[in-house]
Amino acid sequence: MHESPSSYDPRAVERKWQARWEERGTNRVDLAGAGRPFYNLMMFPYPSAEGLHVGNLYAFTGADIFGRFHRLRGYDVFEPLGFDAFGIHSENYALKVGVHPAELMPRNIARFGTQLRRAGLMVDWRYAVSTADPTYYKWTQWVFLQLHKAGLAVKKRAAVNWCPACKTVLANEQVVGGFCERHPDTKVEQRTLDQWFFTITKYAERLLDSLARLDWSSSTRTLQTNWIGRSEGAELVFETPGGERITVFTTRPDTLFGATYVVLAPEHPLVEALTTAECRADVNAYRRRVAAIDIVTRRVGEKEKTGVFTGTYARNPATGESIPIWIADYVLMEYGTGAIMAVPGHDDRDFEFATRFHLPIVRVIAAPGGDALAPMESAEPDVPDGRLVNSPGYDGMPWEEAKRAITRSLEEKGLGRTVVNYRLHDWCISRQRYWGPPIPIVYCDSCGTVPVPEKDLPVVLPKLADYRPDDTGVSPLARDEAWYRVPCPECGRPARRETDVSDTFLDSAWYFLRYPSADRPEVPFDADLTRKWLPVTSYIGGNEHAVLHLMYARFITMALEDIGLVGFDEPFPRFRAHGMIVKDGAKMSKSRGNVVVPDRYFDQWGADTFRMYLMFLGPYQEGGDFRDAGIVGIRRFLDKVWGLVEGRRHGGTGARGHGRAGGRADERASGQADELRRHLHRTIERVTEDTEALAYNTAIAAMMEYVNALQKGEPTPALLEPLAVLLAPYAPHFAEECWERLGHGSSVMDASWPEYDPALAAAEQVELVVQVGGKVRAKLTLPSGTPEAEAVAAALAEPAVARILDGKAPRKVVFVPDRLVSVVP
Ligand SMILES: [Zn+2]
Ligand SMILES: [Zn+2]
């Protein structure tokens, strides 16, 4: 009891509490017995060899604060974390360093685990998962089988992006300007391969419609909306003299009279039949050339328009005129019907194409009073208040009305119908790689495609010494004959396994279902636990996963719900995207050499200081700029709190409190105590509201102001204990230590979040004297701390003051905060 005040030693404090949390099971939650479940999810990391990145830590710390805050508010918070260990990143890295991924990954995971424990996260590690563990991917394969049974997993031939350096298929998002995201010098090619797809497009409408019901960051919702890309339009039929019917999709059927030619994607199945003998050589050469260009370049490319004429004409169903049929690579097979009606007068790309190939350009929409026959200098896609021209039967009709009218008229002739189109494509889940879960399918010459029976899961990934991908487009698994050749599960005759593995996004599309049941080897997810803990209460993660991970997880959940397996169709009713941190204004990257490695900061400053510093960089949902210089300010703040707690214990500043001095000193002390109490309640209010809103930086600022006030006053336990609890989400080890030093035997995480009294939290009202020319003319009652501009405006608005000034501006105004506004007329 007679030890002298110590100084704050983060290393000792953090070690002590990490050990004690482990011992006491502080971070464990009783999943079956919990009364107020709160599932606090954060995006699990890919365990790279470099170890935890400060960007990971930024994400996790913000989510951890939110989880701890809710636990202190009386919830049973489940905060699991795992590892996204399969996938091409891991495999490529393993290839580079020459260590087998099956050995490399456990090492990386162990390293991450150590770092994450140091960070002081409230993770219940009993429920950690690794997607590369057979106890996990057994169920990833099971998910595939459920979708297969439901007809949502199909195999089809498809044109795909192929990176010759990765030797694998790339998603469209991995192609940047025609080059591989990972190999900026390698041009991506187009290949046609047999692939497994999940038919997510069947869910396009539902994925879009139910977005409106989700409490998500609006930026994330917008990204998903655009990705799904719904457009309303019409399918119209252009007939040829030979009896072929070319169906085009258009969002602007009102411009039909301006359609002067038709364009098919070079891959369109009708191209063969439509091409005339004279044009065949040109058409074939063009088709070969296009096959060498990747899809993304075709989709976004700002390059010069190319194309060739097929030699055949089609009939415009509105004008009855014969218009030429071309093929061009700016039309994609995957969008709409793979054919368009070209309206050069009102579409930029069509205008460019028509100009280059001397095709007619006709104006069919004009502003009221506009010249219908004036030549067009450029396409006019949007004509304000546009009405139809050069469209017999519809001239003068507003274009929106004409959309419906023209579609209806073609519908009657069997040449058109209203349709909705989506930009979303089916999800290709096949990867011709090694490091992933084998797709559980067997091919038998007599039975065909046979799913592996559930009782035979997992299909274990064999340990291949040579797992390098090659240029055949076939997975390295095909080289392992012993693994590859199996008896057919149905007839027992010799058969072959599917050698593709599944996309790593499938691993993460269902992991939130697995966590609560991670200790249950016999089921993918326990029905009771799922009902109790899901959907996820709060999900925090990066917006870079807005269109892939979040979309896929929503789709898998909807599919499993339709199969009758989950009981809800949206996994994440609440999602918040955190911001990014940059270093000295630049994005962190290895090549710039400006990546912040957390360990060094843990060593030098302690995890608590580092956590708080990261959160103090800026609004959590916007991110911030990491500069080493600022971190000392947070450390000083914690030192101050430490000093107050220690001073309290050792009677340092406590001496003044036992007021025998009497008289004015007592009065002053009690006035000061009242003000501190009000400040405490204001602080609780601000920290509560800001933490709930993820405005962690301003919550920290409020605590700093309060601590500065405490330093000038009398920090009683009643003023310090709530502070320790407010700090617990932000600086958990530190708060535990303070809590203990303030005389508590149990964890601060078992305390309750302090309540505030709104009356006390409200700013104190003060009376300001208003003088004009030195004479008191009015008195104002305003909240304490009212800023000058507001107080002066209120003073000038007082009738007695306004009368004297008589509309003139005062020559001078003197302002004394909370006291006086003195006006010189
Ligand atoms: Zn590549
Ligand atoms: Zn068979």
Image (cartoon, rainbow, N blue to C red):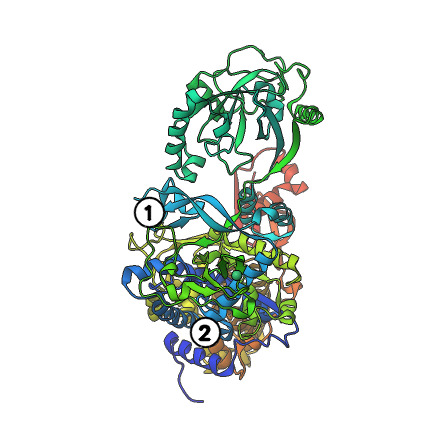
Q: Secondary structure at mark 2?
A: helix
Q: Nearer the viewer, mark 1 or mark 2?
A: 1
The quadrant in which the C terminus is found is top right
Q: What type is the residue that disc 2 sits on?
A: Phe
Q: Is residue 586 visible?
A: no
Q: Is mark 1 within 8 Å of ligand 1?
A: yes
Q: What type is the residue that disc 1 sits on?
A: Pro
Question: Front-most of 184 and 38?
Answer: 184
Q: Is residue 170 above or below residue 636?
A: above
Task: Name which quarter of the figure residue 304 lies in.
Answer: top left
Instruction: Give the residue number, with chain letter if any, for mark 2.
Output: 734
Q: Is residue 602 found left or right of 766 in the rendered image? A: left
Q: Residues within 10 Å of mark 2 (few under 14, many from 20)?
A: many
Q: How far is disc 1 from disc 2 in space, using C-alphas? A: 52 Å
Q: Secondary structure at mark 1?
A: loop
**Residue 114 coordinates in the image, percent (x, y):** 39, 72
